[in-house]
Amino acid sequence: MRGELSPTSKLTDADIIKIVERLNAGETTVRISKDYEVDRATISSIKNGGSWTHITSGLIEGFIGYSGLKKSQIEDMRKRYLNGETVAKIFCDYSLPRQVIYRIVKNKTFKNMN
């Protein structure tokens, strides 16, 4: 189960939409996390597309999300990394957080796209 259906979730789908609105308005992750009584990393994960993407996809300004990546893009990142390019260099060509690129090239996510 994901989202508010998860028994461990402290947030609802409606909370996520409000959080995204606040992020888009420029509020800090620290302030928002205090208001919702969750860890700052939870809000950062929402902001960076690491969680709640079934709600946030297309809503966070300046972030394209990575759920829409094509297999060819993932293969390109992995090939470039294996050929010696750094994550920092690959980062310059994609609008994704470095952590996401790192997880892709290290095969920690999108494992089914080899």
Image: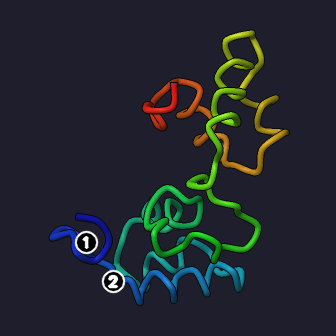
Measuring 43% from the left and 79% from the top, which residue is drawn there? 34
Instruction: Tell which residue pokes out farthest to the top in this image.
Output: 83
Dot 2 amino acid type: Thr
Q: Who is closer to the viewer here, 113 or 38?
A: 113
Q: Give the image location of residue 103, x and y in percent.
A: 53, 34
- The residue sitting at 39% across, 65% down in the picture is 39
Q: Are marks 2 and 1 in contact (CB under 8 Å)?
A: yes
Q: Secondary structure at mark 1?
A: loop
Q: Position of residue 64 (x, y in %)?
A: 70, 61
Which residue lies under the disc numbered 2?
12
Q: Residue at x 51, y 24 (%)?
A: 114
Q: Quadrant of residue 51?
A: bottom left
Q: At which x and y percent is residue 102? A: 59, 32
In this rendering, would 51 be left or right of 3?
right
Residue 61 against residue 88 in the figure, above or below: below
Pointer 1 residue: 9
What colouring method underlies this structural image?
Answer: rainbow
**With 30 as the anchor, is 84 left or right in this view?**
right
Left or right, residue 93 beside residue 63: right
- Which amino acid type is shown beneath numbered disc 1? Ser
Give the answer, above or below, for where 113 lies relative to 79: below
